[in-house]
Image (cartoon, rainbow, N blue to C red):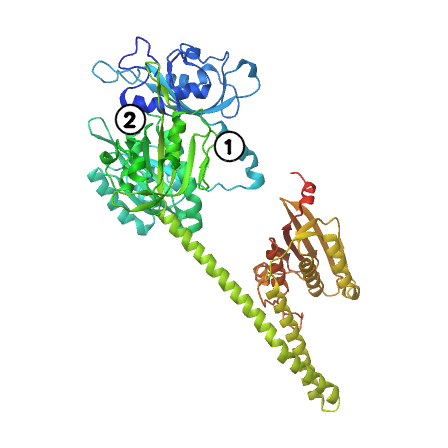
Amino acid sequence: MVERPPDQSRTGALTSGGAEWLIQHLPMGVIVQDAQGRILEANPAALSILGLRLGDIQGQTTRPRTWTLTDAHGAELGFAQQPAMRAFASGEVVTAVLGLNTRPDRVGQGPERWLSVTALPQIPDDPGGQTTGADTAPARVYSVFEDVTASHAMWLEFQRSEERYRALVVATSQYVWTNSPDGQMDGDQPDWAALTGQTRAQYRGYGWAEALHPEDRAYTIAAWEAAVTARSRFETEHRVKTASGEYRSFSVRAIPLLGARNELLEWIGLHTDVTPLRTAEAALKAMNVALEAQVTERGHAYADLAGFNSRLLSSAGEGILGLDSRGRAVFVNPAAATLLGYTVQELEGQPMHALIHARHADGTPYPETDCPISQMLRQAASPATEPLELQSSELQSPDLQSRRVEGEVFWRKDGAAIPVEYVVTALPGSRTGSGGEEGGGVVLLFQDVTAAQQARASLERAITELERSNRELEQFAYVSSHDLQEPLRTVGSYADLLSRRYQGKLDPRADQYLNFMQDAVARMRQLINDLLSFSRIGKTELVLRPVPLEDVMQEVRASFAAALSEHAAELSWQDLPVVQGNAVQLGQLMGNLVSNALKFRRPDVPPRIDVQGHPEGGAAHLTVSDNGIGIDPEYQERVFGLFQRLHRREEYEGTGLGLAICRKIVQAQGGEIWLESEPGAGTVVHLRLPLDRSQEQREPRT
């Protein structure tokens, strides 16, 4: 730790004791400034982030000379607009994202890095320990910051690309609120108002309960009143009617904020939207997002370094352990103790690897040299060493300071293993007062993933069962269709013999019956052939090769030459791309679509069929347009099902399998198919097929 100036005593620039250890080892920078903006002190993380030495900045101000500060959008800030100066002026906490340039040779070239800064003013105390009044100016400002250059660049990139790619960021929605000591909601509650649409007059007191689902109000109010009476932690889950009128499920947590004399100051609560967690897929996706969000929240919670630290550790739902350079626990939050089956006191000072991580899930020893936590401890103690090789279940941040590990277990006090995912973050070492080096430590944040593993296993079993069922159905359709061919040929042969021998020799009704029989045999034969075609698609693994769609359409035109001529139809296309696919199946696909366009034509209107295509997002987007009778919107998905006919057989012939075969061909080749249509105005069938790599350079830029 750097030495304090002589005039710093009880109100020195940095605190002492455990908080001092925490500040000196924080991965976030801390700078202390006086009312003139002079820098009094900075922790090692601040110097590392700024790339400066304490002697370079101590006693200096951040006036725009060699330093340039900008706001989040790149506009340069004057000295008075800087967070620390604003905190001095207002006496309130100021939070901002700033661009920083400390190099004169980069002036005018934009920020060198981006920082997330929280400026906290310190109000001087009177000799009795009480503040001297609301008008007392701050004595110092603590600026807590971290380098968010990478995340800020990602934020800017998301801002630029959000509309083009329509990216939906699935994150856990959270809403913060406060209540008075007696449990009444009062004052401005912007998060609650934004969530429910209630005004201040509507949510005041217990009015907030009117936004709850009627079935959830009674037990929520009862649990809340019990927590207020006992001054205990409040947790529940209920449904809230949002401003849009939709009911969504929320996990609710509130804790009492106690003063120095154990008096209840207020309640701080958090509503977390857990609606997406009601499906297994959303639960799996949300877990990593929530884990990262909790890491970020921990960093922000250090803003009030002394008063808020204990509350952060108590309210976190995930386990948090702080380990020193020897791997011993120096702080433990209640959630970690609960998950591991110990008390906080039993865990403090203990070597964590030997206690909870000494064995793999199968009970075999887990050498400490292979443990990612121990490896990160060694790396924190000797940051100049080469990074250790990661296992397949590990992810490491670009700055080599954080690693996420999955697929491991921690061992509880009762001997049970709990599957966990954890993030271990290195805390760099610091220089001691005697000039030596004090080894760093790590912060370990872990989560019990038992429920997630069970959901994942259930989902995998369902997928396996669905695949088996589909295979059996396809095999049944293939065998049934194949076995029907022989009796159908026999019926057809005898029908042909009867027609040739007795046609015109019996009464007209007999001739009509023979014609009915032959027509039925022809329809049945076509139906069986279509069923066989449908069942064969995807039965064997396709070998995808480059297929020029121009060649496919030439073959389709040749095959339908007679039908096109008969109906005076026009079939056109131009500059079609090359796709990755199976030429035979693509020919069948385009042939079915052209056949449909000819079949469902409008009376006395020559058919017009146009095929267009262009590269789009790494795929080929094709459209097959016609001027036929069209399809009602309510049937535009139904027509892709098996045996789906929208018209009587006397009006339009067919088996109702054409578009079902088209969809199966497209899906077998990794594509999509859908249609747009308006009755009486024609139909546009859309196809997305894998694009051949040689065609990707043709994709138009947007």
Q: Position of residue 286 (x, y in %)?
A: 42, 44
Is there CB contact under 8 Å for labels 1 and 2? Answer: no
Amino acid type of the residue tagged 1 in the rendering: Trp
Query: How crowded is the residue under tag 1: few (<14 C-alpha within 10 Å), some, or many (20+)?
Result: few
Q: Give whichever of 433, 268 is nearer the camera.
A: 433
Q: Position of residue 36 (x, y in %)?
A: 39, 11
Quarter of the picture holding the N terminus: top left
**Residue drawn 27% across and 41% down?**
338
> In this view, which residue lies farthest toward the bottom?
506
Which element type, helix, strand or loop, lies under badge 2? loop
Q: Residues within 10 Å of mark 2 (few under 14, many from 20)?
A: few
Write down the residue under mark 2. Answer: 307
Q: Does residue 547 sit above or below 232 in this rendering?
A: below
- Looking at the rendered image, the quarter that the C terminus falls into is top right
Disc on the earlier residue, 1 or 2: 1
Q: Is residue 562 above or below residue 235?
A: below
The residue under label 2 is which amino acid type?
Answer: Gly
> Residue 284: x, y in percent?
43, 47
Q: Nearer the viewer, residue 45 or 200?
A: 45
Give the alpha-carbon distance from disc 1 to disc 2, as whole Å. 31 Å
Q: Nearer the viewer, residue 411 or 308?
A: 411
Is residue 245 at least partly visible in the picture?
no
Tell me: 355 left or right of 423. Answer: left
- Residue 25 x/y as whole percent: 35, 24
Q: Which residue is mark 1?
A: 155
Q: Secondary structure at mark 1?
A: helix
Disc sitting over residue 493 in the figure: none
